[in-house]
Amino acid sequence: MGAANKVPGVSGGIVAFVGGFYEEFIYSLQKINLKALKLLFNGRFKAFYRYTNATFLILLISGMLISYFSVSRLLDFFLERKELYVWAAFFGMIIGSIYYISKDFEGWNRKTILAGIVGFLIGISISFFSPAKENDNLFFIFFCGIISVSGMTLPGLSGSFILILMGNYVLLLVDSVNSLYDSLSEVFQGDYSFLQNVERLNTLKILAVFTLGSATGLVTLSHSLGYLLKHYKKVTTSVIIGFITGSLGVLWPWKRTIFKVDSTGNTLFDSNGDPIIANYQRYWPDFSNMENWGAVFFIIFGIFILLSLDWYGRNRQD
């Protein structure tokens, strides 16, 4: 989930849904409430641990953090060198996810079909929005944190892609994370010189506010989703299926990045020296190019990964 959440267009919530622990994840987050805080402040740690399903949450969050700082760095490497293949693999995984979620869903009727269409239209419309400029205002960073966890709690909605649209993907998921990684590496080496680096400290402050916003969003969104899953499960699931299907427009592998330019046609850059993304231009591939056949292979490979998870889940239950 940690690696998936970092890739624009991919939702960590889909991993939870396919892994079969989505509802447990949502309901466990709901347990972080006033009752849990009372147990904690009254020193009833064992009761707090059991009430919040802490074993599950600790294992899940630890796995996400480890993957975020390890697998996601590997993904960064391949996105720089073989971006088409990475997008293709995730595109295939989303197709596999749609099959996985839909195959056992028996609640289709007029209401759920309409809900699925609404989810699809919302999902595909997101792919046509244009990214905003980078903004390091701390109130806005806190709001970005709340929005970013949508990828964990809402399958099909990529928190990373939303951050691109808000203009803060590079600042929050690249620069800030790299600053934390570099700072921790220096601390382990006994080097505390970064404490004199004003720019580094400012970036770490931004990361702290972003993390606080993410934690706030995680708890509040989980309560809303828990209510919907409990009272409107079929409609909610149909919206999720439609939303995931619509998100294929974001993940379409064959696209060109369109950068913002000024009135003279020169490319505009942000404060970090990176070109500012205006939008993506999608196109149909030329199959006389062998690289595009390689992308097709990775789409099939992505589908195979999800079918393998389905097979593993069924055999484990047997």
Image (cartoon, rainbow, N blue to C red):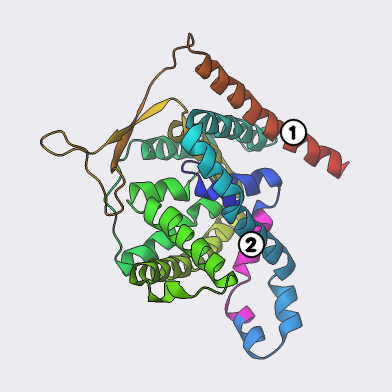
Q: Residue 61 — which label?
A: 2
Precedes in sequence: disc 2 or disc 1: 2
Q: Give the residue at the far right of this rendering.
A: 318
- Tell me: 279 left or right of 311: left
Q: Is residue 162 magenta?
A: no
Which residue: 65% across, 84% down? 40
- The spot of residue 229 in percent (x, y) is 60, 54
- Tell me: 248 left or right of 13: left
Is 96 drawn above or below residue 3 in the view shown?
A: above
For numbered disc 2, what is the local secondary structure?
helix
- The spot of residue 284 in percent (x, y) is 42, 17
- The spot of residue 76 in percent (x, y) is 51, 44
Q: Residue 308 — which label?
A: 1
Which residue: 51% across, 18% down? 292
* Magenta segment boundaries in residue numbering: 23-36
Name the residue type under label 2: Ile
Separation of marks 2 and 1 at Cα, in angstroms = 24 Å
